[in-house]
Amino acid sequence: MFYREAGEFKTSYAADQAIFPIAQDRIALVVLVLAAYVGVPLIANGYWLDAILIPFLVYSLAALGLNILTGYAGQVSLGTGGFMAVGAFSAYKLAIGFPHLNVVLVIVIAGLIAAAVGIVFGVPSLRIKGFYLAVATLAAQFFLVWLFNRVPWFTNYSSSGVISAPLRAVFGRVYITGAEASSVDKYLFALTTVSLLALAAKNMVRCATGRAWMAIRDMDIAAEIIGIRPLATKLTAFAVSSFYVGVAGALWAFVYTGTVEPLAFDVERSFQILFMIIIGGLGSILGSFLGAAFVVLVPVLLSNAPGFLGLSIRVATVTNLQSIIFGALIVFFLVVEPNGLARLWQVGKEKLRLWPFPY
Amino acid sequence: MKAWKGAIGVVAAAVAAGLLVGGVAEAQNEQFVPRLVYRTGPYAPNGIPFADGYADYLDLVNARDRGVGGVKITYEECETAYNNDKGVECYERLKHKGPTGASWVDPLSTGISYALLERTAADKIPLIMMGYGRADASYGPVFPYAFTYPATYWAGADAIIQYVGSQEGGLDKLKGKKIALVYHDSAYGKEPIATLEKLSQRYGYQFSKFAVAHPGLEQKATWLEIRRLRPNWVLMWGWGVMNSTAVKEAAAIGYPMTHFVGIWWSASEPDVEPAGAAGKGYKAANITGVGAKFPVIQDILKYVYGKGGGHATKAKVGEVLYDRGVVNAIYDTEALRIAQARYGKKPLTGEQIQWGFEHLNLTAGRIKQLGAAGLVTPIHVTCTDHEGGGDVKIQQWDGHHWKTITDWIKPHRRMLWEMYKASALAYAKEKGITPRDCSKVEAAAK
């Protein structure tokens, strides 16, 4: 009834090719962005910002990066944690080595370094595919974490191998890293970074680059025959994906936890992000966000639930129950919609267009 | 429809009233302690007894003494699973609970301590790293809100080397001996390396180190290498399942258990029991006494378990990590008592309690009063020295129980102090922190 594009006429190609061709979607997006930029900082307290929303944004970005590689270009990767570590540790080295470098530049360069590392580890993808490639990227995961654990130069010879982000400001005195930075500033910085990169990703997958990725994913021989170069395409996918993941790693270290040891980026992190995009939806920008929300928010919600309900259950019981319920929910959602939450959302929208007169 | 709306209204009003009442109840005479625990995951066998001991002591203080200075201690546990980002989440969740917010936080994880180090300083909440965490945080001028009493890993490493030296017939006899370190490959396990390397230069022993990846179930290769190296002594910085695996693997290669010494986190019953008889003779350092014979532990059995309370089962009371949880709670509540003497017997903020921690002078006399003589090492924390100069004991597993086999060993604090200071000042420089002038802090307090 409300969600219908009848009467909305497109008069130019630009209007027809807009990311959100339907006016209602655009309104919803504006409302969402306003809520995120104005509403959330007004309402949310430090716990919500620091412990829920910032990690959600960082995870979303990492999931987005992996989705570009796995969802769009079809290259299975288990090296996400390793590439995040590259982003985190190079950002740290840059920030410490060049104290006057703006933190935005630090994070961008850290992303570029991660992209370069991604290209190196992407080379095997030209010869191997599927599970075999997953194993090759797993090697990247273990090697990179091992490297940061073993070479003390990366941690500035810290006796414990832990790095901590120095105090840095975006402009003037708006600190976004370090303990003195306010949660709101950190949140807004993470939100802006993630929004810009998500917009870039959305446009990338709609243009020639993205189409080439998808062609390679769907059938690489056919793609090669129609003139798509597998080398360049696969490596750009690795580069762009690793850039996103590297920026996510830098945000993790600088904006989210503030301190990082290589263990934070172990193989479990890679699996966690892979689960996010599988649950959220492979090959969908929205899916990355939905998957991250599911994996980050549901456990927090479940662990807080007894408190909200006024029940006093022992924490061990709550944690075990949480794992059981979380696992059951994953199975439930994947049975209901094997293509992830993003597909569920799409089906919902289709239904909404026909409502209240379905046929 | 109307009836429905009415019903919803009534429910909403009831919920709102409940929240208000809850809010009023919370604002009573209570001191809130956030409890970051891990009762699940690979480190749960060690996390559970510690959390139980800590909680039981707080229950004892509430039941026997009606709180500290008449202020009831309340606490809430949050599960971290020894996971750094969950630890941060728990800290953020609990830091504003209670009438005055979190009193202090003991994360029982070096990784989480690192993650909270700057947050706690910014929030003005004392971070207590009892025998773990960042060793150089002992230097109070740079780390006003971090405390490392009664001994850091660096002090632990020094104490163990002293013990090894005494077994070899003097520290000068260490020359040419081979000492290996098996460590958990994380911030925790890496802490002692610099100290052991420095000591190897001083005493001339050959030092080699073996990292074990988290969680530590895979150690076959490590121990084969150790067998090839044939070190005179093996030290271990392990935690959770890594400990019991290491003891089993050491037994499998026939390494003499009497020359295998763990740090105090590799020193509890769950670490050696799985190895069975093979673990007999294994040694470890400790910062507390062991057993249930102490009056304070007996009081817990009487006032808490005797009344049907208690977090653990009775048989577990008096285990090494249980006792350590109790000791941690004793130190913390004593600091609160000292802060109350200055600021009044009411709920205090973390900033006020920090004063208590900085003036925590726990003498042997006071420890005896608390019924913990032999369990707790005396400490004297000051504005400069956040370690407090606690001592270390060595204990040995006899196949059934841990037995303390040495008197308190004093770590070489003068050398360590220089290391703390140098490392802390380097940190301050990297972070742009101006160290406090402790003489001025003391003068201002008077």
Image (tube, helix red, strand yellow):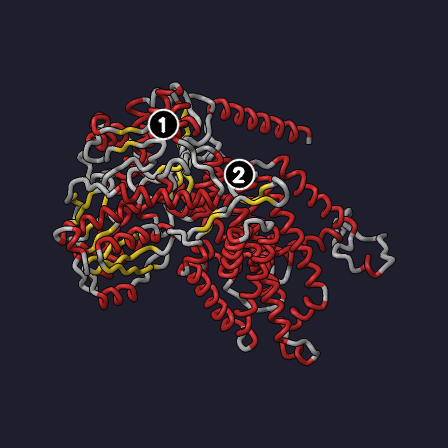
Q: Chain of mark 2?
A: A
Q: Is residue B274 left or right of residue A186?
A: left
Q: Amino acid at mark 2?
A: Glu
**Residue A337 visible within the image:** no
Which residue in the structure is indicated by mark 2? A180
**Picture quarter containing residue B403?**
top left
Q: Is residue B372 left or right of residue A18?
A: left
Assign a secondary structure to mark 2.
Answer: loop
Assign a secondary structure to mark 1.
Answer: helix
Residue B393 position within the rendered picture, expressed as x and y whole percent measured from the top left: 20, 43
Q: Amino acid at mark 1?
A: Gly
Quadrant of the snapshot with the C terminus of chain A: bottom right
Residue A192 position within the rendered picture, expressed as x and y whole percent measured from the top left: 65, 48
In the foreground, A41 or B230: B230
Q: Chain of mark 1?
A: B
- Residue at the far right: name it: A11
**Residue B386 visible within the image:** yes
Residue B431 position within the rendered picture, expressed as x and y whole percent measured from the top left: 48, 43
Residue B364 position within the rendered picture, expressed as x and y whole percent measured from the top left: 21, 29
Vertical relation: A57 (above or below) A271: above
Q: Is residue A14 left or right of residue A302?
A: right
Q: Residues within 10 Å of mark 2 (few under 14, many from 20)?
A: some
Q: Are the numbered discs 1 and 2 placed on the same chain, yes or no?
A: no
Which residue in the structure is indicated by mark 1? B356
